[in-house]
Structure formats: C-alpha cells, structure tokens
C-alpha cells in the first residue's frame, strides 16, 4: 500500500474522531446547559430602617453639598422622614444603623448595560454589590437571537427581584431588538416597528451600518416617530446630523458614535484605526457647537460609555488593564475570558497608534464636557458585557472618566442618579435622598464630592429597602465568583453563543 493512501486513511480517521469528539462535546454541553441555574435570594426587607448621624450627599445643585448629622427613616422600602438628629421619633421596631462619619447618597444608575440569560448568576448580584441599584438594559438575550419567538426573561426577573427571590437592581428599560438593516420591502419597516411597539419595547435600538446615509436614517426616524416609538442607539459615521429633518433621537450611545459628528471629514471615516487620525485632524469646533445645540434643543440624551468606547480602544491598544483582568479572573466565566483575550489581542497596537488612540479618547472626553456645557443631558453608562467591562465595577471607572472629562464630582454623580431617574420618567420615585422616594441608597465611607473614587468605598447598599451590608455584599460577590467557575454555567454560556439564547 502506498504512503499516500495510508496518510489519507489516517487523515480520514482523525477527521471522523474529531467530528465524533465535537459531537460528544456538543451533546455534553447541551446536557449540562439543561440544568436550571440557581438564583441568589435577597435579604429580608426590614419594616423600618434608620440611619443616624449620617451626612447626606445632596446633588440637586450643580456643585453638590453635604448635609451633616441627619436621620433618615425608611419604612416599607420608602424614605418616610429625614432631618436633623432627634427631629423625628424613631419607629419602635426599626433596624438602627449608626452612620457616624458615613455619606448617604442615592443608589447609582448604569444607563447602558447588556444582559444574558445568565445575568442573575453572573451580573445582577455584582451590580447591586457595587452600588448600582437601577439599570437600562440596551440589549438582552433576545436582541442577538434569530428566533422571532424569543421571550425576554426580564419581566420574570423584575418580579423575582421585587419578591426578594433574586438579587438584582431595578431593570427599568430593556430592549430586545436591534435594527441592524433597514428592510427593503415597502411597508416592512412600519410593520416591524408596529410589532415592537405592540410587544412593549421602550424604544427602537439602532445599530445600523456605519455607511447608512442621512436620508435612510431620516426615514427610520420618521417611521418610528409616526408610530410614537422613541429611537436610541448608534449614529452611523456617514450620517450628517445637521442635515436630518427635525426629528429627535432620544438617546445617543457611545462616544465613538457622536465624535465623528464634530468632524468635517466624516465620509472618509470608517471607524477603523487607520482613518482615525484624519478624523481628529478634521474636528471642527463650530460644527460641534451646532450639533450639540441641536441635541440640547431636542432633548437627546448622550451616554458616552467612555469605558467601552474610546477608553476601551486606548486601553486595549496597550494590552488591557491588569486590575480589570484580575477581577475578570474571579467574576467572568472562562469561555468569556477567552473571547476578551482575543479582543485584547486584536486591539493591541503600535506605540504610534496607541498615542493616536489616546488623542481620540481625550477628544471624546472633551466632547462630553462640551455636551454637558451645551445643555445636553449626559448619563453614566458602561456597555457592561463588552470586553473588559464588568457589571458594577465598571460604573465607578466611568464616573472617573466623566470627571476626567471635566465634570465636577457632583455633576458626574448626577449623571448616575437623578438625571437618569428624570430622563427615564421615574424622577418622582428615584434618584435623590428625599422623603417619599423609594429607598435605593448607597452608604459610603468617604465623601464622593471630595474625590469621585470614593464611590468605591462602599459601606452598604440599600435596594428597595433591603440592606446589603459588608456580609451581604461579600455573599453576593462570592455567589458570582462561584457561579462563574461552574461547569453548567460555563456550558450554558457556550451553548448560548452557539444557539443564540
Ligand atoms: Zn451596548
């Protein structure tokens, strides 16, 4: 027998063995993925909770200020009274917390996260333990699914969180669909948007191709507006915002999406590194001013997500952040860490490119400050789930980005408390430490107005009146660390990538 046919025979055998192994692995993964993952139950809600001798961080004026020596009384999950020490009688059965030397502020919001079916195991407890008590979900499991019958788990999670059966923040808005292509058939866009409206989608999330024309973008806005569905998402690079008819975009996501609108050279920009230097060179302050004035006038929100946008490009170019990598080792399942490692590898750049990406990042930070100064509502958001962006932890980094952009700590904190509460229509219930509001609070060991990094010095988190002290926070983080290492969670994660659930 010739060497060639022996080689062929062995190659064939190896291929069959590989296919068989893959099949077995696939079946094993499927089987493991069948197990229903467990949820972490929340601590019981005390009927009354009192903070004594606490300093309240009041963010209602631009500078922010501290109101010292206060009592805050929470009854059945709402702030029942507050005032100077001794100004109110304390409820008889209250849990009393001596908060001498501590700072109480409204719980934090992340206005841009993503969820997966595994979020109750991997993300929601982390958000809460890190003081994030409300989120806007910009894309869940169904957004990536090709199954038109995909049902979002979010309504069920909301119920379980409210009942104390699951630890998690308030999931205020959740988007289950991304528009990535404009359907060509006449009437198809109308039908699609009508269906989204009927399904209770809070807005139409746009992730159109970067080269989408201004006319096509305007057409999508017009159809959505005619049906009363707000539009949120990415701006295509080729779009000229100033040429759009007067239709409002309710929220613009990511700094890389808005920055090109400040440049004259948009038609040559394709989002890749090689075209970024020209974009920087073409930034036009007058144009930028006009763009921001229009956004302010139309009431568009701006969620720069610096950490996941130009900040991420600059960081990945340098090989990533070791502190984030250490957190990921603990809280992110291995298959996801591999994906992140691949993205880190792909993002690595030459020293010249690193310097250019840092310049782009600085330009994006400057734009955030200009947007704020022009009256555009800037909100703190992270795009958590993106490479090296961890739920909860990353919001504190984003707050630092906002301060690096030139916002004061009080303005940055407002972007993560009362501004999102107002922007998402729950300003009367959430966002400040005031009588009548829901008790979503953050108790800090140091003053966040003095240094924004102090938001990381968490003493306790109150979510819906339930208190998460050192022990409960540690338990929530240990739960995620444990879940992230479990085979069945890892296999569900991998199976989810394959089967898009
Ligand atoms: Zn996103």
Image (tube, helix red, strand yellow):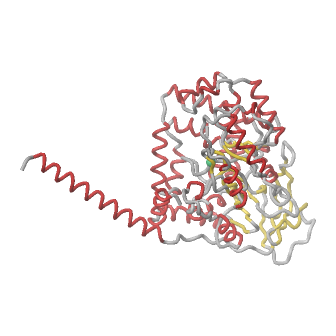
Q: In the image shown, does 457 or 492 lie closer to the viewer?
A: 492
Q: How many discs mark residues in the rendered view?
A: 0
Residue farthest to the front? 186
47 relative to 420, above or below: below
> Quarter-wise, where is residue 474 in the image?
bottom right
Residue 55 rendering spot, x and y as whole percentages:
82, 55
| Residue 283 drawn at (x, y percent) | 68, 24
Residue nearest the viewer, comparing 29 with 427: 29
**Looking at the image, which residue sits at the far right?**
87
Q: Does residue 188 lie above or below 149 as drawn?
A: above
Residue extending farthest to the top is 281
Q: Residue at x 76, y 74 (%)?
A: 46
The picture quadrant where one finds residue 93 is: bottom right
Left or right position of 219 against 68: left
Can residue 91 be seen?
Answer: yes
Q: Most extreme residue toward the left, as rendered? A: 1
- At 86% from the left and 53% from the top, the residue drawn is 67
Q: Position of residue 434 (x, y in %)?
A: 86, 59
Q: Nearer the viewer, residue 421 or 485?
A: 421
Residue 220, position as x, y percentages in the image: 70, 43
Is 166 rendered above or below residue 14? below
Q: Is residue 460 visible?
A: no
């Amino acid at each position: 027998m010739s060497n060639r046919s022996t080689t062929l025979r062995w190659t064939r055998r190896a291929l069959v063995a590989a296919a068989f192994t893959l099949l077995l692995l696939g079946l094993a993964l499927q089987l493991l993925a069948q197990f229903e993952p467990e949820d972490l139950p929340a601590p019981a809600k005390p009927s009354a909770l009192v903070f004594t001798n606490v300093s309240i961080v009041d963010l209602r004026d631009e500078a922010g200020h501290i109101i010292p020596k206060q009592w805050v009384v929470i009854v059945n999950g709402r702030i029942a009274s507050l005032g100077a020490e001794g100004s109110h009688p304390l409820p008889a059965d209250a849990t009393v917390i001596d908060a001498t030397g501590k700072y109480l502020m409204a719980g934090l919001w992340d206005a841009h996260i993503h969820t997966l079916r595994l979020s109750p195991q991997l993300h929601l407890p982390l958000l809460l333990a890190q003081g994030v008590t409300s989120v806007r979900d910009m894309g869940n499991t169904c957004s990536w699914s090709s199954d038109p019958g995909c049902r979002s788990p979010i309504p069920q999670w909301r119920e379980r969180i409210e009942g104390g059966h699951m630890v998690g923040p308030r999931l205020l808005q959740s988007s289950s669909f991304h528009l990535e292509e404009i359907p060509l058939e006449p009437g198809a866009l109308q039908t699609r948007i009508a269906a989204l409206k009927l399904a209770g989608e809070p807005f139409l999330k746009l992730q159109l191709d970067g080269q989408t024309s201004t006319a096509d973008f305007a057409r999508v806005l017009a159809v959505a507006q005619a049906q009363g569905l707000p539009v949120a998402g990415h701006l295509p690079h080729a779009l000229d915002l100033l040429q759009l008819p007067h239709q409002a975009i309710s929220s613009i996501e990511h700094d890389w999406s808005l920055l090109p609108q400040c440049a004259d050279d948009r038609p040559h920009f394709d989002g890749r590194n090689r075209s970024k230097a020209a974009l920087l060179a073409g930034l036009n302050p007058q144009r930028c001013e006009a763009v921001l004035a229009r956004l302010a006038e139309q009431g568009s929100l701006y969620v720069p997500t610096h950490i996941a946008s130009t900040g991420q490009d600059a960081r990945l170019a340098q090989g990533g952040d070791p502190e984030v990598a250490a957190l990921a080792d603990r809280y992110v399942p291995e298959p996801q860490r591999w994906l992140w490692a691949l993205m880190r590898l792909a993002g690595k750049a030459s020293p010249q490119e690193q310097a250019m990406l840092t310049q782009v990042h600085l330009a994006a930070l400057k734009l955030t400050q200009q947007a704020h100064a022009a009256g555009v509502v800037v909100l703190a958001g992270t795009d958590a789930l993106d490479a090296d962006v961890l739920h909860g932890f990353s919001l504190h980094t984003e707050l630092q980005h906002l301060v690096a952009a030139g916002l004061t700590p009080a303005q940055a904190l407002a972007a993560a408390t009362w501004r999102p509460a107002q922007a998402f229509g729950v300003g009367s219930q959430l966002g400040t430490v005031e009588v009548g509001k829901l008790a979503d609070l953050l108790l800090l060991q140091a003053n966040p107005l003095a240094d924004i990094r102090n938001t990381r010095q968490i003493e306790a988190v109150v979510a819906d009146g339930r208190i998460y002290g050192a022990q409960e926070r540690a338990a929530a983080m240990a739960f995620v660390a444990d879940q992230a290492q479990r085979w069945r969670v890892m296999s569900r994660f991998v199976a989810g990538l394959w089967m898009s659930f």
